[in-house]
Amino acid sequence: MAIHVREQERPKVIVVNPAHGNEPYILGTAIAMAVRDRLAEKGIGHVRILVPLMYGERQLKILSEEQHEDPFAIYLDEGFGKMLREVVFENGDFAQHLSRLNSRFDAVSGLVSNRFAIDAPPIEARSLGTGSTVWIYPSDVIATIDTAARIPVPAPKRYFAFPTLTSEILAEAQEQPGCLGFSRVDMEKVRARMAEMEAGYSQVFIPEVNSLSFKYADDLSGQPTVIEGRSRVYTPATKAEVAPTSGNVDIPGIYAMFSGTKATREQNLALVSHLRESGIAVYMPEWETTVQGAIPISPSVLPYRNIMAIFGRSGWGTGWQAQNLAKPWLVTPYHAGDDPEICFNNMTIEALGIGKVLDPGRLDMQELKRLLRDLPAGVEAVNSRIREKFGTLDGIAYTAGHVAEDLATS
């Protein structure tokens, strides 16, 4: 049974509004929690974080691991999650996603708007820390953290934080034939919807190294601060800065993060096989049990010296970790039908010299060993420029500081 609290005693609420996949809700929650901490430092305490429950127990497990030090401010909204699942990208079919988003956008937007209207009834939400339920009142919402959200949530303040605005990804995709294969009509309709939604953001935060940075590889400082009238704040990579560790694994190797489409997974398996045949150890998360010969171990080993590189599909959840650890990011080729962002991520990785696209069918082990030797210097060079500009590699803290300052003074 959910607990009612008198209005004058109720905490304020920040809503996380993510896109599909794990990293958007992980990132949104991390920023929201950091904003909560900054507000507490300013004397504004008692803030709850409301996150849509989109992926059931798997999401609960991941959030519990990510926020194990302080899970008690996080609450899961299953009803909101079900609404968003109506329009998420899944099954590796971005064309279907565009079509579905166009056909369902108005209906789902209406449901979400009604759920979070200022005079809407309270929402029953589940505590990540205790499992008990409480009532969350939409009138207590002070802000949203949108991580490439597809559907707007009504709130006094809305903030965007992700590698690139969705409208810009879709606009770029229409200019890049190699990243297409989708209906231009659907793509343009979604781009227009996203541009309208993005126009309402109070602030937009984009990492200095982002999906479209390949266009400015010679000088990242040349990236525009205003596009189509929308200003943005550039940030370090939106992961915490990882302190060096003295730990190690016994055999030098590569850590493989699997994700993405079925075809991408098959590419990953082929590459892992090549690496093992060449005497390079392959480490993988414990939950990956289908890869014969891979060494299951927690991703907590990523900072260890003998982890020479990080491998997988080029989603930024993995990429930001690789960047902040100054380790090469080895990625699979873009596969037709996948999110166009992945195509641009691959282009940025190679243009900035922070990693390499590896085709399992054309893998040259001597070339790979050269990359493992030479690429770290490229990542270090990028990180050095970012640290000089921002004073930190921690984009979570940097973004949260701006958001908290804006909320505290508004």
Image (cartoon, grey):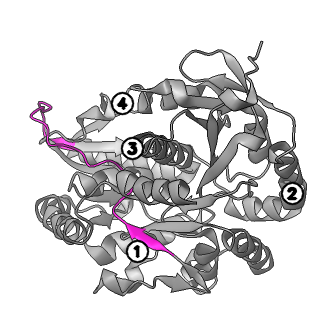
Q: Which secondary structure lies at badge 4?
A: loop
> In the displayed structure, does residue 184 sit left or right of residue 159?
right
Query: Which is the main secondary structure of the residues drawn in magenta?
Result: loop
Compare marks 3 and 1 and give the one earlier in the sequence: 3
Report the residue marked by disc 1.
Answer: 347
Q: CA distance from mark 3 to mark 4?
A: 15 Å
Q: CA distance from mark 2 to mark 4?
A: 42 Å
| Residue plotted at (44% across, 39% down) | 40
Amino acid type, callout 2: Arg
- The residue lying toward the viewer, choosing from 207 and 368, is 207
Amino acid type, callout 3: Met
Location of the N terminus (image quadrant):
top right
Q: Which secondary structure lies at badge 2?
A: helix
| Residue plotted at (25% across, 68% down) | 386
Q: Where are the magenta residues, as a range?
A: 232-253
Compare marks 2 and 4 and give the one earlier in the sequence: 2
Label 4 crowd bin: few (<14), some (14–19), many (20+), radius 10 Å: few
Amino acid type, callout 1: Met
The image position of residue 66, as x and y in percent, is: 43, 33
Amino acid type, callout 4: Gln
Report the residue marked by disc 3.
Answer: 257
| Residue plotted at (31% across, 58% down) | 330
Compare marks 1 and 2 and give the one earlier in the sequence: 2
Label 3 crowd bin: few (<14), some (14–19), many (20+), radius 10 Å: some
Report the residue marked by disc 4.
Answer: 292
| Residue plotted at (65% across, 49% down) | 142
Q: Nearer the viewer, mark 2 or mark 4?
A: 2
Q: CA distance from mark 1 to mark 2?
A: 32 Å
Q: CA distance from mark 1 to mark 4?
A: 31 Å
Q: Which secondary structure lies at badge 3?
A: strand
